[in-house]
Amino acid sequence: MLPQTEIEEIYSDNDILVVNKPSGIPTAPLTGDGDEFCLVNIVRKKHPQIMIPRGNLEREGGLIHRLDTPTSGLVLFALNQAAYDNLIKEQKRDGIIKQYRAVFTHRTNDLPDGFPPFPYPDILSGNTIISSYFRLFGPRGAAVRPALNAGAKRCSGQKYSTQIEMESENSVICTLSRGFRHQIRCHMAWAGYPLKGDVLYGGTESEDFGLTAVGISFTSPSTGSYLTLTL
């Protein structure tokens, strides 16, 4: 049986549901087992309609996007097939914009193995856009590394960009429309500012993880208007 976990609901209508995922909970099941501990299986107990849409993976239902297990914040679900199809098309057109608060503790020049030299200005000097391909790194591809060309071994073959804006002396807002696994974590480490608690990418140990999805913007399937939701 799944542990009892209260999930905060941020917004809902007839077509979509947006919830606030706590840190430490996987977004989606890795197998087809119904009782696997993850956000999808917790939310479906209260909102079984999230399983009505059918995409590439039946066990994910109407889930539109994922967050890494330690990352907290906004997650979007579709509640019917038409809404799901519309949102997936919008996501493929880079039309769903996501914002994350990234918190770091220090600046370092000691990058983990496998990072090329950072080719961009210091992210604290002003608004910066970091772009790269990504390649899998380590046993079973547990981590990723930025790649400067699409021909790198185990490379994504597609370029991904993270726009970075200063928020405070130890936090930035990262905006992206197309995401790769660990994208912000890797780009922040590459810039020399690994996230708080992100020991996989050179960050300091902490009970708190320094990445939260704080904003999401997309076209509402219900009204056709542009909808922005924030924490």
Image: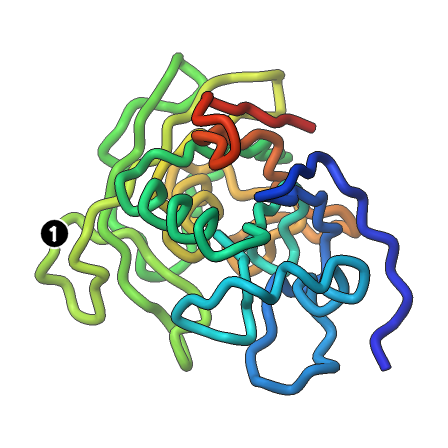
Residue 135 makes an appearance in the image: yes
- Residue in front for this viewpoint, 69 or 12: 12
Q: Nearer the viewer, residue 84 or 210?
A: 84
Q: Amino acid at mark 1?
A: Asn
The residue most toward the right is 4
Q: Residue drawn 83% across and 75% down?
A: 2
Residue at x 34%, y 40% (from the top left corner): 90
Which SS class for mark 1?
loop
- Quick one: 121 or 150, which is closer to the camera? 150
> For the point 59% across and 43% down, which residue is it?
16
Measuring from the top left, give residue 163's x and y in whole percent: 37, 27
The residue at which mark 1 appears reads as 149
User: Where is residue 43 shown, x and y percent of the image?
Assistant: 74, 59
Query: Is the image coloured rainbow, by chain, by secondary structure, or in one colour?
Result: rainbow
Describe residue 156's horizontal placement relative to residue 126 as left or right.
left
Characterize the local packing of mark 1: few (<14), some (14-19) or many (20 or more) Cα atoms within 10 angstroms.
some
Residue 123, x across and y down, in percent: 40, 23
Q: Residue furthest top?
A: 126
Q: Is residue 164 above or below residue 116?
A: above
Q: Residue furthest left?
A: 151
Q: Quadrant of the C terminus?
A: top right
210 on left or right of 145: right
Image spot of residue 25 (x, y percent): 71, 62
Count how many numbered circles sit on residues in the image: 1
User: In front here: 7 or 166?
Assistant: 7
For residue 139, above or below residue 197: below
Residue 174 visible in the displayed image: no
Quarter of the image holding residue 49?
bottom right
